[in-house]
Amino acid sequence: MFLTNTSTAARAMIQTSGYLRHRLLGSTTTIIPIVAAGSGTARLFSLHAFSEIKPEGTMTKVVCTLGPSTDSKEMIGQLVRNGMHVARINFSHAGQDYSYPEKLLSLVRTAPGRHQELADGAVHHSEMPANLRAVLVDTKGPEIRTKPLQGNVDEAEIATGAIVEITTDEVVGEEPPSCPSGPHRIQIDYKSIGSSVSVGSQILLDDGLIALKVIEVKDKGHVTTVALNGGPIKKNKGVNLPNTSIDLPALTEKDKQDLSWACKNGADFVAASFIRTAANVRSVHAYLDRCIADLKAKDPQGTYMRPLIISKIENKEGVDNFHEILAESDGIMVARGDLGVEIPYRKVFAAQKMMVKACNEAGKPVIVATQMLDSMQRNPRPTRAEVTDVGTACLDGADAVMLSGETAAGKYPIESVQAMTSIVGEADEIWNESHSLAQESRPKKNPSADHLDEELDAIALSAVRSAKDLNAKVIILISMSGKVARAIAKHKPTVPVLAFCTDVLVARRLQLHRSLLPILLQTKMDPGSNMTRMGFLRAEAVRTAKELGIVKAGDRVVTVDRTAGKSHDHFDFSHNIKLSTIRET
């Protein structure tokens, strides 16, 4: 069905890092810019500072973890308005009944950004989503954590030299120690602790903040240790066993329940924790496929799509097997918390750089996470070292940077995302000004790619080069499956890429790629059909970009699409690139 009345028949929706816009093509919609906090830092190549979120938003993406500090409609709305692209729901702390993650998911899906409602008189579209923010479900994974403490206290203080028994027995009903010197009994959820460690082994609590040395192994479930250093400990804190093979499956029963929930509720990404081998990723992939198949069998009319798998690298085995893990994954998270405990902390920065570079070469999104602005859990401003950490990660090629405790449980969640957006915006400008395709190593070719993929890759590279060389304002593309968008993102464009999609599930799954700005173009036309007039959709995409204030008369744009061949053509698909300058209307 061709569109004949574009003023009433097609809608486009855009969610940038700072706001959401609904618009009706051909109608008038007021654009409300969002002003973010200034970085207060001189740019590397010029003296002016990045001071506001541009209409197209930041190019490097911001992931925010939701939690007690941000689990209200008002707070999530503020996260949206100040730069969140992806909302992370951490299942390490989720309840068994899923009421809390369901609440968070609902708040994200229904929270509008700062926008105007559909124009007066427009017919409401029942399938119009409230926004295009993505949701990432972070599984608990085969990890070890502390259980409720003695006396069910919120926090226990452990003194240096204190005797600490690590046990699998329940201790919540016991009296807590009268003083930090103990003795303490701490319950963990790893049944094989006694068979995994030996006298002299170390057990690290809470990201290594407390180090314990094993002095006696009583039996499989009881180990006696001495605290090498003191500090506070709470329930649900991570337990690490450096240089120890852990007897845990790739997917726990809790993980399977969480993955099933993610599929049923339409999560866009799943972060698979403690991935150690490529086989671990394949296990996650296979289970997700089964969940989607079951949902489709039960509800043939439903719309379900497998969440993309983001493998979390957080131990030595994962680093050692990184390249085989990357080949099986849809993306990577550099989870520096546990990683910095499992491997010597001096090696973390080199591992991070290696993983970011490999992801860039493979064209897969990479998130740098953990303690990026950690001090902002307590303070309203980041440290200079944290600012440098975030900026360096962006300049190294990270697609996204993540806030964890800063937005989940910190005192300054909104200030944290404002600071992150400000730093990211500064880094984006430096990258875009200094990035030279001639100086960059070209992403590696996929040896298994067919001729269509090779052609698409060549067109994508040409589009990115052309945009850079001709100082284009944006790259505009139309993509049904997201394949064209990902092909362009692989080559690290220096201008925003407006990815027009017809499927909201596809659009949300593009949110982790640097530079991609997904836009939902609601139309009956199928961009993959040989009956579709691609030129018409291309024109509508440019019109949308102009009406949203992203491009104006005199701006140069690069448009890319993949067109199905018609009956008289001698090809199945053609890949097209067009260069044009916007004219006055």
Image (tube, rainbow, N blue to C red):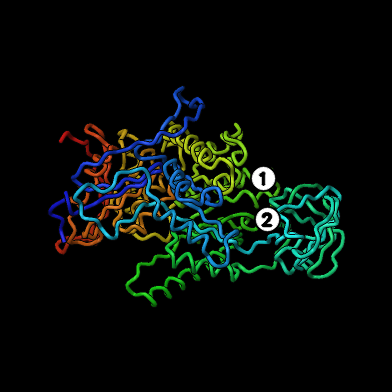
Residue occupying image coordinates x 36% and y 43%: 114
Residue closest to the eye, 263 or 479: 263
Residue occupying image coordinates x 46% and y 42%: 441
User: Residue 336 at x, y = what percent?
Assistant: 62, 48
Residue occupying image coordinates x 56% and y 51%: 68
Give the label on residue 347, or none.
1
User: Residue 375 at x, y = what percent?
Assistant: 62, 39
Residue identified by numbered label 2: 237
Rate crowding at label 1 as few (under 14), some (14 to 19) or many (20 or more) other CA atoms within 10 Å. few
User: Does 39 sit above or below residue 567?
Assistant: above
Q: Are marks 2 and 1 in contact (CB under 8 Å)?
A: no
User: Does 564 sit above or below residue 493?
Assistant: below
* Residue 202 sits in quarter: bottom right
For residue 459, say whether it is visible. Answer: no
Find the distance from the CA under tag 2 to the CA under tag 1.
Answer: 23 Å
User: Does 178 sit above or below residue 305?
Assistant: above
User: Residue 404 at x, y = what percent?
Assistant: 57, 48
The quarter of the rendered structure image containing the C terminus is top left
